Image: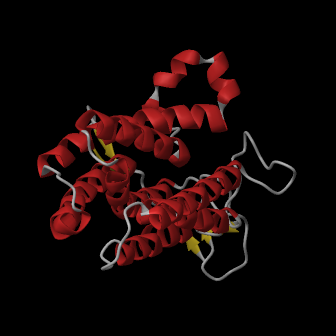
Amino acid sequence: MFTHNFDPVFFDLSFISIRWYSLAYIFGILIGWWYGKKIILRRFSFVKNNFDLKEFDNLVTYLIISIIIGGRIGYIIFYNFGYYLNNPLSIFKIWEGGMSFHGALIGVTVGTILFSQKKNIQSLFLLDIIACVSPIGIFLGRIANFINGELVGKVTSVPWGVIFPNIDMVPRHPSQIYEAFLEGVLLFLIMNSMIFKKNYITGTCAYLFLINYGIFRIISELFREPDTQIGYFFGILSMGTILSLVMIVIGIKMFQSIKKNERKS
């Protein structure tokens, strides 16, 4: 057993404090930005897109805004609507926490589509790149969740159980680490094994991301405590599970659409 004793604050200078979670966002975006450009350079002739690499820099600005707005709105709607309905000013207190991955995903998708329409760039091409780099940020985010001692797992007797003193004094599954491996490491390997295939079809990584993340998240939810303000729907389904099931369905629909268009061409 291991007792969690990490400080969520990376350093504190009295007038400003930097938290591990903030660093996860910053480095997730920076590394994803760098690696996304590497993918484009390596695959530029392959995707046959008349794409100015500088446009990817502009896209990142859209994505940062989309992540923040989408993640916040998603959390409000999916996880704590009643509270924010009664406390509307708290909507803007992002520093107090409250971001949703699924909300951020919606925000990123909408932001990317709007950007692609404005710049006349194929949106699926951009979504493929984003799908390949997103696991980097997800991995860092889940590690930050573990350091913060949040989104904890269910009570367990496994030898690697972790005690989170800020929650209680019983060992729990380190579900954040499970998610970091599944949604971060494993998903990254799957996405980046696909994007460099010789006969790659644009849009493949986009739908595979939705399907595989959805599956991995559902598996992780089996070991994770549900949100206390929501609990389970029908006694077995967490909000994360429901939203991930929707992701899988959308991913399958995308797959069918891409395959249909491929047969026509």
Query: Looking at the image, is 77 positioned above or below residue 2?
Result: above
- The image position of residue 46, as x and y in percent, is 22, 69
Q: In this rendering, does residue 5 appear at all?
A: no
Query: Looking at the image, is 128 positioned above or below residue 187?
Result: above
Which residue is found at the position 66% from the left and 17% from the top? 86
Q: Residue furthest bottom?
A: 159
- The image position of residue 126, as x and y in percent, is 32, 52
Image quadrant occupied by the C terminus: bottom left
Residue 82 versus residue 7: which sits nearer the camera? Answer: 82
Residue 259 versus residue 211: which sits nearer the camera? Answer: 259
Which residue is found at the position 34% from the left and 46% from the top? 22
Q: In this rendering, does residue 161 appear at all?
A: yes
- The image position of residue 49, as x and y in percent, is 21, 56
Residue 179 versus residue 174: which sits nearer the camera? Answer: 179
- The image position of residue 214, as x and y in percent, is 59, 61
Which residue is found at the position 27% from the left and 33% from the top? 118
Q: Quadrant of residue 111?
A: top left
Query: Looking at the image, is 247 positioned above or below residue 118?
Result: below
